[in-house]
Amino acid sequence: MDECVVIKGKRILLIISGGIAAYKGPDLVRRLRERGASVRCVLTAGGAKFVSPLALSTVSGDKVYQELFSLIDEREIGHIELSRDADILVVAPASANILAKMVQGQADDIATTALLATDKPVVVAPAMNIRMWEHAATQVNVAALRSRGVTTLGPAEGDMACGEYGMGRMLEPVEIADALEAFFRDRERLSGRRALVTSGPTLEAIDPVRYITNRSSGKQGHAIASALAQLGTETTLVSGPTREPDPTGVRVIHVESARQMLNACEGTLPVDVAVFAAAVSDWRAAMEASGKIKKRPGETTTTLDLVENPDILATISSAGNRRPQLVVGFAAETDDVIDNAARKLEAKGCDWIVANDISKAAGTFGGVANTVHLISRDGVENWPRLSKATVGERLAKRIAQRLTEAND
Ligand code: CTP
């Protein structure tokens, strides 16, 4: 598919917030327009300190929207209409301040009001000083926005206007234009597709108060479901108990045990792609006691009979004509990560295995980052250490690519 065809004719609402990178706004408008998109600009009060509305209206060929309560603006096109008329909202540069306002749902100017009033995809390209970017408040805000379906582009590492070097520089306009093209292309590839994702631990009851579970946080599975939904896939997430919020735009089925998880997964078939990121308990108590199991006097050791749980990944991989076109398993390993994972690919009959090192030193379980290897029958791709959100986005893009290749 010709990439430029994908962005051609798209209506982009470009929100320029307050930061030195706002001076790149006119260049970004030009890059997008030369690829055939139409661009309408919203300029915040902070943004207007760095770039003039005249420059933006000249390159966009349209009025620049700055006032929330302007009679003229509202007569021409209201703030609701602004986002209704767009295919996508792009905030570039996105300052730490506008990210925080988006998390809070504030609507105190035309930019934040348009962002709150939209049901269109939202993409942000953060730009700020490295310490502002690394501050826990900003990191929490970005994670919250991502889990609500906002796509982040960058920031990049480099020299900054404040004289420092580090992470926080806005991506270059051409990189943002390329990323938006890729975004539209992947959405086109995945639109009309259905996905199933499992996430979190399972919880296997022993008696009314005790259970067997594991340390899975659900962060990775939730991030994958969120990324697939951002690219327009109709996504169902079957999740064991986690503290993660339900991702926006995803149908979530909450379960506890492996058997419930299997039932829920089977109930979502047929799907085009299924990703099994849950850490399913291999065992459950042979008999769930109806009353609390009491400690007997003098008892110093005890035993618990366990029986094997169904293997959800293996079951769905061999579901005959209900088998998804692409089945992706995970392998949580502490030793010989790639060899063990490659064995699981064969044993479970899936198409890909995402292998991750869950040894304590790697800090994967419960942590925000993940170092994974994507294993298929074609070989092994070693991915760098990435945030779980980025692993989710990268996997969603690879899925889009694979489903398209398979249909060509
Ligand atoms: N899995 C599953 N159902 C199970 C066990 C595992 O669907 N009862 C899936 C997981 O979601 C994951 C893959 O199988 O996608 C591998 O899980 P993992 O725990 O790494 O492997 P196990 O099969 O449990 O093997 P072992 O514990 O021996 O490493």
Image: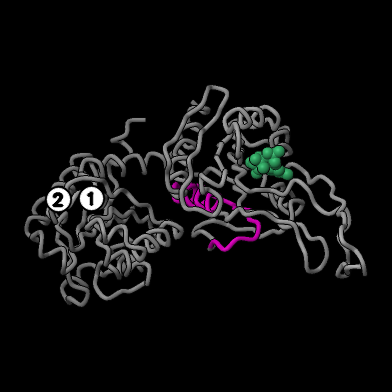
Residue sitting at x 23%, y 58%: 128
Q: Secondary structure at mark 2?
A: helix
Disc 1: which residue:
170
| Dot label at residue 134 | none
Mark 1 → mark 2, Cα distance in angstroms: 9 Å
Number of numbered markers: 2
**Residue 124 percent coordinates (x, y):** 31, 55
Disc 2: which residue:
24
Above or below 348: residue 248: below
Residue 99 covered by magenta stretch: no
Residue sitting at x 53%, y 49%: 220
Residue span colored magenta: 219-244
Q: Secondary structure at mark 1?
A: loop
In the picture, measured across the screen, residue 322 lies left or right of residue 38, that is: right
Mark 2 residue CB less than 8 A from any atom of ligand 1? no
Q: Quadrant of residue 108?
A: bottom left
For label 2, count other residues whose C-alpha is less than 10 Å away and answer few (under 14), some (14-19) or many (20+): some
**Mark positioned earlier in the residue sequence (1 or 2):** 2
Regarding residue 89, the answer to whether it shows in the image is yes
**Residue 48 percent coordinates (x, y):** 12, 64
